[in-house]
Image (tube, rainbow, N blue to C red):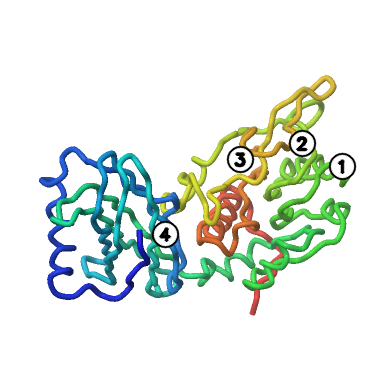
Amino acid sequence: MGPVHAARIAGAAATAVIAALAAWPAACAEPAAVLACREHWSTFFGGREVRLHFAARSEPPVDGRLLWSHAADGRTIARGELAAELKGGGESEAEIRLRLPEVREGVVLDTQLSVVLADRRNQVLARHDRIVRLFPSDPFVDRRKWLGSLGIVLYDPKGATEAIFKAHDLPHRLVGTPAALLGVAQGTVVIGEGLSLEDRRGLAETLLRLAAGGVPVLCLAPASGSLPFPGGGDGPQPRRVVLGGCEVIGELDKRLDADAWAPDGRVAAAGLELSAAGRGAAFSVAPPPRGWSWLEVVYPQGGRLIVCGFGIVEHWDASPTPRWLLLRILERLSEGTKRAVVSFEKE
């Protein structure tokens, strides 16, 4: 397939695009070809240019065109045309460049992209429709006062999570050692992404102890190590232990991508496998796709521990989903807990 023509199609070509899209049900009850998008995610930052790659396959040879139309609220934003030449039984790929419109802070906009493979007689051979969901870059607009009320205490020796918190003015207090976490009685504890539980002796037990005492705790995608099974031995018994996978993302916010994230389709950065540990059991960190990517432990005192295996920090700049997911997880952690006494609110 040839290069993308981002300019509007004029005259007869524009009419052909519209006619091909409208005539699809009647013209192609049994598709003679297959058209699919390589990118399986739907969330994008507004105001940016994105490149989507479409693969077409046909048993009979095709000498035709790829017609695309991008619309929002029933209004066409852009449309274009590419040459499409497929050998019989062969596959070809085309790149469509979309300049996405800006969206206002606090607004999420669903737009529609329709792509049609048509022959020279404008007979539709295959069609692909998808939602292109646009988010602003900052999910924390009008939420920083609430975030300050959480009293976030961050332990992040690697520094990547701290850098994101600073860049987005997320209120927090940084501590430099696991021992400093033992004194946290109010607030929300966050453990930075990519930390080795194995290298910090006693940290896993400290996280469980904090949650059992009523403190919300979030551990972002640990790199290695293990976590004792909650309630094992002489530890406090949790009210609920929940294990899950990518479906948790949709449960937290159905607008977010749950199955694939930009830029490489990977979602999970760490998994948790249940294994024997002495006389008890433990969750061992494993590379995905092994294990569960979500562990949530809820205690009667209102504390909650979430170990999130999704690569939120790793994929932070690639799509909106990691940013909105972090916000939803912090909201989840605050459920059923006492209001934080310590506040790190940004002025």
| Amino acid marked by disc 1 | Gly
Query: What is the secondary structure assignment of the residue under circle 4?
Result: strand
| Amino acid marked by disc 4 | Leu
Sequence order check, earlier mark of 3 and 4: 4
On residue 202, the disc is 1
Q: Position of residue 46 (x, y in %)?
A: 43, 70
Q: Residue at x 65, y 61 (%)?
A: 150
Q: Are marks 4 and 2 in contact (CB under 8 Å)?
A: no
Residue labelled with disc 4: 52
Q: Position of residue 79 (x, y in %)?
A: 27, 68
Quadrant in the picture for the N terminus = bottom left
| Amino acid marked by disc 2 | Leu
Q: Dot 4: few (<14), some (14–19), or many (≥20) neighbours within 10 Å? A: few
Spatial separation of the CA atoms under disc 2 and disc 1: 10 Å
Residue labelled with disc 2: 227
Residue labelled with disc 3: 294
Spatial separation of the CA atoms under disc 4 and disc 2: 40 Å
Q: Is residue 298 visible?
A: no
Q: Residue at x 68, y 50 (%)?
A: 220
Sequence order check, earlier mark of 1 and 4: 4
Sequence order check, earlier mark of 4 and 2: 4
